[in-house]
Amino acid sequence: MNDVKKVYLSWDDVDNLISCDLVPRLQENNYDVLIAITRGGIVPGGMIAEQLGIQQILVASVDFYEDVEHDLDWPVFMQFPSDSLLRDQQVLIVDDVWYRGLETLSVTERVEQAGGRPTSVVLHYKPKFSRFDDKAPDFYATDTDDWIIYPWEIDRNPLQL
């Protein structure tokens, strides 16, 4: 991890990624519901919801447990909105970064299973590290190989980053 460039973003950097890059492209659709993936999607999700005027904001919390024998990661949803809140809704799924892609894709699949119409958005897409060559977020501000440190993470213990 020492050879990876660390990039510290300011609040202005994040605001520019959202306001100048993502929101103009997201405005082409009307979203009924926004799902923020914990923890990283909470701050950008709130900022995007405010700018797009999305009033219904929900949270999805997903973790993964490895099945080493079969080289699989199994999603475990600690928190997820009920199907009735998603059925027939245009759902915007927000996270800060697409690293392996597991969280965003798992939430997207759950929304589809509930009868919702998902659209995924992240601030940073890391295609080099993605587990899915044939999939990507629907929208992202930029792609990178760098280790992004968001302003809401700066005071966090470095071992947690």
Image (spheres, grey):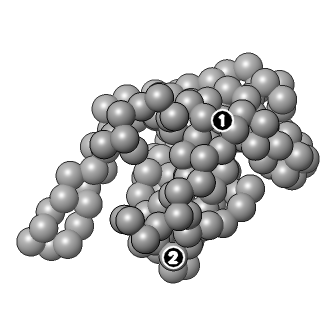
| Type of the residue with mark 1 | Pro
Q: Earlier in the sequence, mark 2 or mark 1?
A: 1
Could you tell me which quadrant the N terminus lies in?
bottom left
| Residue that appears at 54% across and 46% down | 149
Asked whether the residues under the numbered discs 2 and 1 touch, taking CB atoms below 8 Å apart as contact, a structural biologist would say no
Q: Residues within 10 Å of mark 1 (few under 14, many from 20)?
A: many
| Residue that appears at 51% across and 34% down | 154
Give the residue number, with chain letter if any, for mark 2: 128
The percent position of residue 2, horizontal first and vertical second, equals 38, 65
Q: Please identify the quarter of the rendering in which residue 47 is found.
A: top right
| Residue that appears at 88% across and 46% down | 20
Q: Secondary structure at mark 2?
A: loop
Q: Please identify the quarter of the rendering in which residue 131 is found.
A: bottom left
Give the residue number, with chain letter if any, for mark 1: 44
The percent position of residue 120, horizontal first and vertical second, equals 64, 51
- Residue, far left: 69
